[in-house]
Amino acid sequence: MSDYKELIAELVAAAETPAKTIKKSMEDTGKKAIGCFPLHIPEEIIYACNYLPVGMWGGKTDLKLCDTYMQSFCCTIMRANLEYGMKGTYNFLSGIVMNAMCDTLKCVCEDWKIAVPQVPIIPVVYAQQRKSEEGIEYMKAEFKRVRHALEKLEGRMVMDRDVENAYEMYEDYRAAMRDFDATCVNYPITMDAYTRHLVIKAGFFMDKAVYKEKIKAITAGLKAQAPEKFDGIRVIATGLLSEPNEVLNIFKENNIAIVGDDLAQESRLWRTPGRDIKGSVWEKMALRMADQRGDCFLYEPDKQRGEMMIEMCKARSAKAVVVFMMKFCDPEEFDYPIYKKELDDAGVPHLYLEVDQMIDSFEQIRTRIQAFAEQF
Ligand code: SF4
């Protein structure tokens, strides 16, 4: 087996065993870890403070303790995160950073302080008017506040230069991810739906400086091969995240490949590069968020998401869009009628799958995916 295939297998295994991977990353780097709740956590600042940022995107567990604080109509990602916190699973974390981009997150920010007092929380709140001068100034101040909170936690000062270095490393990581994503389009057999997702997900549990080099090596290994002849169905995935993993295996069984995505857990995190300007690192970080398009968690009056997905379908020869609708995720649900009309008008078919991380019976979803595949 060639090196890049070994690396793919390594990252898939790393994503399948997050606790083990995080433990190893902490041992290898000698760093303490900070948990990053979903959606645009400024990891550069955490990294600059010499912590290992690790992703907290829920998981499959019995939901019992969290019901003291959260109603059953909250998304399972947040319920799982709170459940794990209350069970003590996250006691190894030095703290967590959480934003408040939806009503559920706003509530969990407060619930966490009472329910999981042993793991300190640092909130970060993004500007609604993120493109305005005032919004940029506010974001710069907010990022500095996060640095200050981490400095207090770590008990040492962190210089702007440290944050600049971390930002540059993250820019390199984001560029590597964009290259990997674009390359996968030509290798839909090797990078099937399950493998592509797990390789991307592994990055949440590893030091990004280490992970990005593995991604670059995989990308180079793929590019050295001839593009794969694929007679199946190419699709674009949208939504919060393309889980549970069992669903991805059903795509694979039906010869459906995900050749691009608009997922909050995947390309929305790296698709926007920072501007090449002379300003401070704080300004660069604020402007990167200001430049993000088609993201339902960031205010955008002209809603470019549908148009972006239609363009991606054309560019990547995708026949359809698959919507992974996380049950009870309001910001994702509010966007759906808008881009559904745009997809319909453009003649792009889509498959709407309502998912949550606790599903344990997949037969209904299997039938829907089979029926979807048969129309092509
Ligand atoms: S409602 Fe959506 S955005 Fe909010 S926490 Fe849940 S999954 Fe995340």
Image (spheres, grey):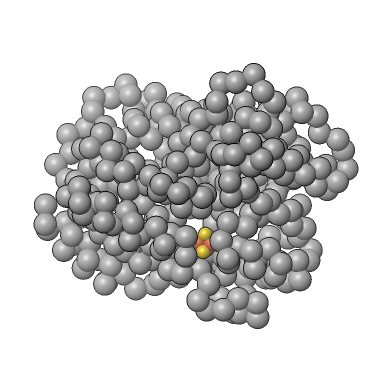
For the point 47% across and 29% down, which residue is it? 176
The residue that appears at 17% across and 50% down in the rendered structure is: 347
| 317 left or right of 95 in image | left
Q: Is residue 102 left or right of residue 278?
A: left
Is 5 situated left or right of 234 in this image? right
Using the rendered view, name the quadrant where residue 101 is placed.
bottom right
Residue 264 in sight: no
Residue 279 appearing in the image: yes
Question: Residue at position x 63%, y 36% from top?
Answer: 133
Give the x, y percent position of residue 211: 54, 34
Q: Residue furthest right?
A: 155
Residue nearest the observer in this picture, 375 or 286: 286
Looking at the picture, tell me which residue is in the foreground, 271 or 213. Answer: 271
Residue 99, x across and y down, in percent: 64, 54
Is residue 245 toward the left or the right of residue 201 in the image? left
Instruction: Locate residue 350, reporting x and y percent.
Output: 24, 56
* Residue 282 versus residue 238 in the image, above or below: above
Q: Nearer the viewer, residue 16 or 151?
A: 151
Name the residue rendered at 56%, 61% in the picture: 102
Residue 135, given in percent of the width and then of the height, sits at 64, 42
Toward which corner of the image does residue 78 lie, by quadrant?
bottom right
